[in-house]
């Protein structure tokens, strides 16, 4: 009987000394590197907050849930008479949407760089029509268009930029007598 008690006592002492040595190692590590220990503690606390928030505190279902909710239908006296309802509600069939009309004017600067610009094309037509150069209306700001714009700006005593600006369009509109675009 004594030997059984002694062996239990030895096991308890070993476990206590192992726990104590682990606590001593952790304490020594914290005292050696307090900044690193604080950073590790903060990261662990932030991770715990994120996990608790994601798992317990969100209302409604997540679009991509971590865990699939499998509900077990409870068997009652009324449910035995009825056929069992599916646990997951059936989704309606996917109906393709009709194509939506594309807006006439988009605010897409990349497309404006790639595609011909109707604004530049209108400026090219007006400049060509009023003799500021033989410009083919391409919708792109090329050297011939820049030279014609500079010639128009010099004639109207505007700041010479060689670019299509709002002021240039306004001057061309007053010359032509109707909006360019």
Image (tube, rainbow, N blue to C red):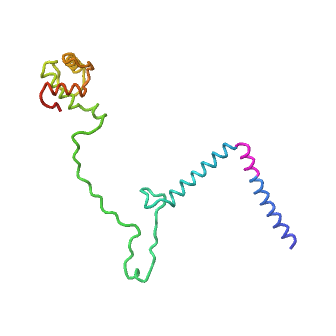
Q: Quadrant of the C terminus?
A: top left
Viewer-nearest residue: 6 or 17: 17
Q: Main secondary structure of the magenta part?
A: helix
Residue 142, given in percent of the width and then of the height, sits at 24, 22
Q: Is residue 12 above or below residue 24?
A: below
Q: Quadrant of the N terminus?
A: bottom right
Relative placement, left or right, of 124 versus 59 is left
Residue 58, given in percent of the width and then of the height, sits at 47, 59
Q: Residue at x 43, y 58 (%)?
A: 62
Residue 123, given in percent of the width and then of the height, sits at 19, 26
Q: Is residue 124 above or below residue 85?
A: above
Residue 23, given in percent of the width and then of the height, sits at 74, 53
Which quadrant of the structure image shows residue 173? top left
Tell me which segment is drawn in magenta: 24-33
> Can residue 27 be found in the magenta stretch?
yes
Relative placement, left or right, of 146 versus 63 is left
Viewer-nearest residue: 23 or 35: 35
Q: Residue at x 23, y 44 (%)?
A: 102
């Amino acid at each position: 009987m004594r030997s059984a008690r002694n062996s239990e006592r030895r096991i308890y002492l070993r476990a206590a000394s192992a726990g104590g040595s682990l606590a001593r190692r952790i304490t020594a590590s914290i005292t050696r590197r307090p900044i690193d220990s604080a950073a590790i503690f903060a990261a662990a606390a932030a991770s715990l907050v994120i996990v608790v928030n994601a798992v317990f505190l969100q209302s409604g279902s997540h679009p991509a849930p971590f865990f699939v909710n499998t509900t077990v239908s409870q068997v009652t006296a009324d449910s035995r008479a009825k056929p069992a309802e599916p646990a997951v509600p059936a989704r309606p069939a996917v109906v393709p949407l009709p194509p939506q009309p594309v807006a006439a004017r988009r605010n897409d600067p990349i497309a404006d760089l790639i595609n011909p610009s109707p604004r530049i094309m209108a400026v090219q037509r007006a400049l060509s029509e009023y003799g500021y150069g033989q410009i083919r209306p391409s919708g792109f700001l090329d050297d011939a268009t820049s030279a014609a714009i500079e010639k128009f700006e010099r004639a109207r005593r505007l700041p010479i930029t060689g670019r299509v600006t709002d002021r240039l369009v306004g001057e061309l509109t007053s010359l032509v007598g109707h909006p360019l675009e």
